[in-house]
Image: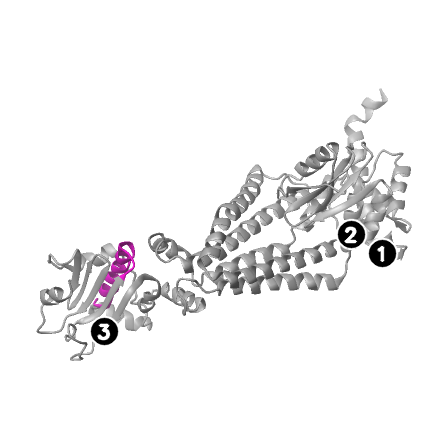
Amino acid sequence: MKTKYKLINYNMFDEDNWTEMFEKEASKGWMLDKAGLFFFKFKKSQPRKLKFFVDYNPAYEDYVDLTSKFGYAYIDNFESFSFWYSEDDSAEALQSDPVAKAVALKELYNTPSIVMTILIGLLLIIISDPFGITMNAVRYDLGGAILYKEFLVMFLLMNCLGMSMLLSGGAKIFTRIRYSREAEGLETPTIFFYMIKYLYYFFRVSALILFVPVLISAVLSVEPLRLLIIFILLIFNLLFGRTYSKKIFITSNIKNRKKYMISWMMFIILMLAIANVYPLESPGKDFAVTSLSVQKAFTNDANYYETIFYDEFEYYGSAQGQDFGEFYDYSYVERLYDCKNDYIANAIFEYQIEEIEHDSRIPTVEELDARIEAFDPYRDVEYKSYEVAIVSMTSVESDKIESGYYIGDRYLMKKGNVILYVLLSDGYNIQEILNAYF
Amino acid sequence: MARIEFDTLTPQMFYILLVLDRPRHGYDIMNEISKVTGDNIRVGAGTLYTLLSRFQSDGFIELVDEVDRKKIYVITNKGKNKLRKETEKLQMMVMHYEGVYGNENEI
């Protein structure tokens, strides 16, 4: 038997599109057979003039029995939408009362389903993005991503999925508000229709434009075999979940509900597994470890920046008189950062300057008194922007470096991708040190 | 003013509650409504099903029996009160109408 598939256009806000499309297909000889995960399946039949309906009640046996007495036949369901047809061209709509229809639709967008969507969305973002690194990642990685992409694709993959779930959660909230207003006999403000429409629009666009390319680069940049296994499991899980979501729709059996919940838990577990697939380009380094360092890096702990931002990071310590080798037999060098690129070097440079300024700020007597009064030893941590910090520092004049600043005995200098942070001891000259390094 | 859900019944809601004065199942309810109203009010199967489950959870009706997968419902006291209040409201509206246009009809 000939079959034909059509992508399910997820137009929740305008289900009339669906019935119109089914009627058109039926008149051309394609009868709606099933609604799958992504596609409507049509079977070749005689061209017929049929009337189609979308309904929102669960298709339990008693309901199917009742409707069949009036000539309606149940076809299949897609999530909570069920599809029916009638051979009688003058058949009335299944939903004859607009208020009751709004009540039925409101039930669809119930609080647990909204909470679930938003929680899973948040969870995906949290898995990939602890401590709110998204904004920092945007800031640093627009420069660094091209160089160090393997952790980023996974990070973006989870974020895209998480963001699109949040968007659909948002759309569901507005849809619920819309129908509960209609159920109470209130007009829905036009802005709501736009909100719902565009949230779904962005949901789909973010899924297609962001998710697909990120998915492809994920497959290319991480270990393909492990990822493939997880993807196969994920597809099995989706099919498993779908089977039970269909069963929930036609029978009110608690066992099916439990299995459906299990499929959601599996989804989360598989997502966690995806986050831990390790990248190709750094064999020997577990991705989980890498991503953990990334997460810590963004908490502004400079020691962890190395994992993502530096090719080389040397921490010499500041112990006086320690022997650091041929060139480094001075005790002046605190840290040296050889950054991935100039963009990152600039960012680190700015960050370090703020730190230095903060460290060397000597509080006045009044400030100390105020601090003791406040009983809060951490109150003195005050955010200083780069511009503010730089004003209180003195520029280092040298041909060897692009830019450098000092305050007291602390020097921070940058040339290309290299940042040198020096704690100058007595008896040393900064020019000498620069000659040794650059 | 905001209307709470089911504060005012639509005609279809009203007639569903009305014909449930004695135990009936879905098909029976729809036929009875057509009979009572002389086919003026017809309830779609989807609407009926939605409203029956909502009325049941709100306590306006209760499930009394299930025969051959057919659920049989009957109105509760809460439902009867609802119906009475609704009728009083309608009577009041008719009275007010007659207060304004009552004479015109006679002429």
Of the two numbered discs 2 and 3 in the rendering, the one whose residue sits closer to the viewer: 3
Q: Nearer the viewer, residue A17 or B8?
A: A17
At numbered mark 2, what does the secondary structure look like: helix, strand or loop?
helix
Q: Mark 2 and mark 1, same subunit?
A: yes
Q: CA distance from mark 2 to mark 1?
A: 10 Å
Residue A328 in the figure: left or right of residue A196:
left
Residue drawn at x 79%, y 38% is: B92
The color scheme shown is one colour
The question of residue A271 being in magenta is answered with no
Q: Quadrant of the C terminus of chain B?
A: top right
Residue drawn at x 90%, y 38% is: B36
Q: CA distance from mark 2 to mark 3?
A: 73 Å
Which residue position holds label 1? B63
Which residue position holds label 3? A316
At numbered mark 1, what does the secondary structure look like: helix, strand or loop?
strand
Q: Nearer the viewer, residue A112 or A306?
A: A306
For label 1, the crowd category at 10 Å Cα-Cα, with few meaning under 14, some 14 to 19 and many 20 or more, is: some
Residue A25 on image: x %, y %: 71, 35
Which residue position holds label 2? B53
Residue A299 on image: x %, y %: 37, 65
Q: Quadrant of residue A13?
A: top right
Residue B26 on image: x %, y %: 86, 47
Residue A155 numbered mark, or none: none
Predominant SS along the magenta part: helix
Disc 3: host chain: A
> Identity of the amino acid at label 1?
Leu
For the magenta stretch, what is the residue range? A339-361
Residue A222 in the figure: left or right of residue A306:
right
Mark yes or no: residue B1 visible.
no
For label 3, the crowd category at 10 Å Cα-Cα, with few meaning under 14, some 14 to 19 and many 20 or more, is: some
Tell me which label, 2 or 1, sits earlier in the chain: 2
